[in-house]
Image (tube, rainbow, N blue to C red):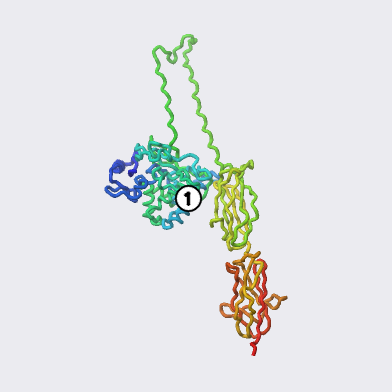
Amino acid sequence: MAAHFGRLRKGATTTAVAAVAVAALSASQAPGVTTDDLGRQTAGAQPSADANTGGEGGGATGDSPYYTDLPPLKSPNPSPSASPATGTPVSVGEAEAGIPATVLDAYKKAEAELRASKPGCNLPWQLLAAIGKVESGQSRGGRVDASGTTYSPILGPKLDGNGFALIADTDNGAYDGDPAYDRAVGPMQFIPSTWEWAGRDGNGDGKKDPNNVYDAALAAGHYLCRFDRDLSVQSQMNAAILNYNNSTAYLNTVLSWLEYYRKGTHEVPDGTGTLPSNSSNSHPGASPSPSTPATSTPSTPSAPSAPSTPGTSKPGTPKPGSGGSTSPTPKPPAPSSPAPSPTPPTPTQTVDHLEDANTGKLTATAGSAFGAKVAVRAESKASKGVAKVRVRFTIIGDTDATFTGGESVATVVTGSTGTATAPALVAGEKTGDFTVRATVVGRVLGGLDYTATVTPRQADTLTRTSDTALTCVPGGEFADQVELKATYKGAVAGKVAATATLIKSADDATENDKGPYFKDADGKTIRTLTDLTTDADGVLKLPKLYADDATGTFLLRVNTTGGAVLTVELKVAAAAS
């Protein structure tokens, strides 16, 4: 579509600003005008690739309105306010630093995806949070369902040229419901023509929905990371933000929130985020700001009262048969407007607690998958299962165990019975206990902790890989090294810990003080080897053995985790003459 730059706002601060906007808007309609990386228009240039794939003139948002509230100044004694989640007094600054749980999760997931797909971009999730704040007040304070979709569409005003850029409909109303003009849509306020090529599926449901915060956040991340930008370079970050919405005031507002969020944020329950109140669309008679869906129908004005006709009674004049009263007829009281019905609670808000859902014993050998999975049930106060609730499973403790896929955190939506089952756990090499914690995303509720145990790899059998006799002369070295193979229930036992000791006798497993020996790294005599491990094929090859001046038959004993034991004979005798 043609480039559209700079909306015309009534009440512009100066005539010069209005003139510039008029000139820019006029220029955008001229042939041969394109938009550069900063959203500036240049006449006579060749159309860029982006101009051919969705139009850059109005950025991602079509320069729709945005919230102009700035982050609070942190002072030593901030004024207190009540936390919506707990009622506990918190400072205004702390409340503003709260980001609804699902929205925050969407930003962090988008950052993780861009870190993998476009590592050179260096996109911080706080930038997405800053844009989400000024575009939609963090999805209207986190009014989203378990999948991240807003409960009602977030729509900007129609871009009909009346105070804004003129962008005729490009999607037949598919995204914005308006078949005449485009409107910015969703938590990140994409115009339909941009979403058509920039949209992403961030929550893996197979759809690209601009009203889904996971989809919108990922799309915004990719949009900001175009042109091989490195957002760790301030000039390139500025260019990306201006490309999103070409306004210096917008740039400064976003950067203010970015800096604020970088100093610290915290998660708050969905639906309890603080809502901005000031919009760049603040002049009288303007279309609604993005905080309100722009789909409501204007109320119909009341019909004017019929004019009085000659001969009708006037107030204070008695009517025939009225008894001569001169008092005016009292007017009936105006019907009171019905109180608005309260917003129904979200499924997440109805959850009272989590219950275990028959989770089995969580035990696995190092390097193997756990046979049982953690399963919980989200329940209401009446102990009924609550569907469509996000449950977060987190691995806690000194462990290298992960969920399938290598993650230490997994989020699952409860099914129709209210049950959520975590992905399978996979044990690492670290043995011992760790914790899997289940919590409800978007609620401050006690979670459920499960203890999981990783046991060492085991072997129940050890055998030599060769039957060659192990012999040596006094003061010499054994020609063959001892090589063993470990198995467990008939299968190869790889990475099993083992210990080798030269013992005094079959009945006395203490370390011998004479006879064959190993050498350490410094060449000193040692007769016990620890921290041995079989290889992936279950094979263990011991270092070379040496003999002192003692002759006779000596014993080498090897033990593994799991109880496998093998005793090997070593003979030291003088060479035959």
Name the element at disc 1. Answer: helix
Q: Where in the figure is residue 496, as x and y percent of width and height? A: 61, 67
Q: Which residue is mark 1?
A: 107
Camera-side residue of 268 and 496:
496
What residue lies at 53% left-to-right and 37% top-to-bottom?
343
- Check the image and name the residue furthest to the top: 321
- Check the image and name the residue furthest to the right: 507
Amino acid type of the residue that numbered disc 1 sits on in the rendered structure: Tyr
What residue lies at 66% left-to-right and 79% top-to-bottom?
570
Establish if 285 lies above or below 433: above
Camera-side residue of 467 and 344:
467
What residue lies at 61% left-to-right and 74% top-to-bottom?
483
Q: Is residue 533 left or right of residue 156?
A: right
The quadrant holding residue 434 is: bottom right
- Check the image and name the residue furthest to the left: 44
Camera-side residue of 326 and 573:
573
- Check the image and name the residue furthest to the bottom: 577
